[in-house]
Image (cartoon, rainbow, N blue to C red):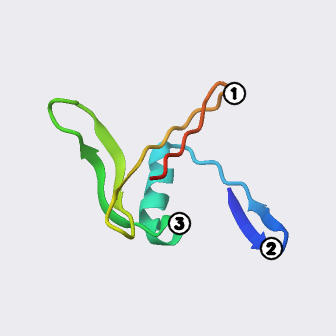
């Protein structure tokens, strides 16, 4: 979705559906500075052999704290959206 900020808040400008998580990931990674004020570090960053996973997008905040971004493409009312900011 794309929003425009006006004097009363945010106004929906355009709804955009992504066919894959990767499309959204590419868009976010290309625009991390504009969206979140973060610097891109890596895509599909490995968490190592112990944890055996990976982080979709890894970035650094303005004060050099790690920012981990995960993408999920699902259409279900049972999905919980979480955002953690430290």
Percent of width and height locating residue 25: 45, 52
C-alpha distance separating marks 3 and 1: 26 Å
Q: Which residue is mark 2?
A: 6
Kindly report the distance in space between the C-alpha atoms of the residues bearing marks 3 and 2: 17 Å
Q: Residue at x 45, y 71 (%)?
A: 33
Mark 1 or mark 2: whose residue is earlier in sequence: 2
Residue matched to label 3: 35
Kindly state the secondary structure of the residue where label 3 is placed. Answer: helix
> Residue 16's quadrant in the figure?
bottom right
Instruction: Give the distance between the C-alpha atoms of the residues marked 1 and 2, in whole angstroms.
Output: 29 Å
Question: Can you name the residue that lies furthest to the left here?
Answer: 49
Write down the quadrant of residue 63 in the picture. Answer: bottom left
Front in this rendered view, residue 15 or 41: 41
Residue ranking furthest to the right: 8
Q: Secondary structure at mark 1?
A: loop
Which residue bears the numbered disc 1? 77
Please report the residue visible at 61 percent of the width from the left and 29 percent of the height from the top. 79
Q: Which residue is the extreme one toward the front?
A: 86
- The local secondary structure at tag 2 comes to strand
Q: Marks 1 and 3: in contact by CB < 8 Å?
A: no
Q: How many marks?
A: 3
Rate crowding at label 3 as few (under 14), some (14 to 19) or many (20 or more) other CA atoms within 10 Å.
few
Q: Residue at x 49, y 60 (%)?
A: 27
Closer to the observer: label 1 or label 2?
A: 2
**Farthest top residue in view:** 78
Quarter of image, res 53: top left
Q: Position of residue 51 (x, y in %)?
A: 22, 30
Mark 1: few/some/many CA within 10 Å (<14, 14-19, 20+): few
Q: Is residue 78 left or right of residue 82?
A: right
Q: Which mark is residue 51?
A: none
């Amino acid at each position: 979705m794309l929003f425009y900020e006006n004097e009363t808040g945010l106004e929906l400008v355009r709804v955009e559906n992504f066919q894959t998580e990767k499309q959204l990931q590419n868009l976010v990674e290309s625009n991390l500075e504009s969206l979140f004020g973060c610097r891109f570090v890596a895509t599909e960053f490995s968490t190592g052999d112990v944890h055996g996973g990976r982080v979709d997008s890894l970035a650094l905040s303005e004060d050099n704290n790690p920012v981990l971004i995960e993408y999920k493409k699902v259409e279900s009312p049972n999905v919980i959206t979480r955002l953690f900011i430290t």
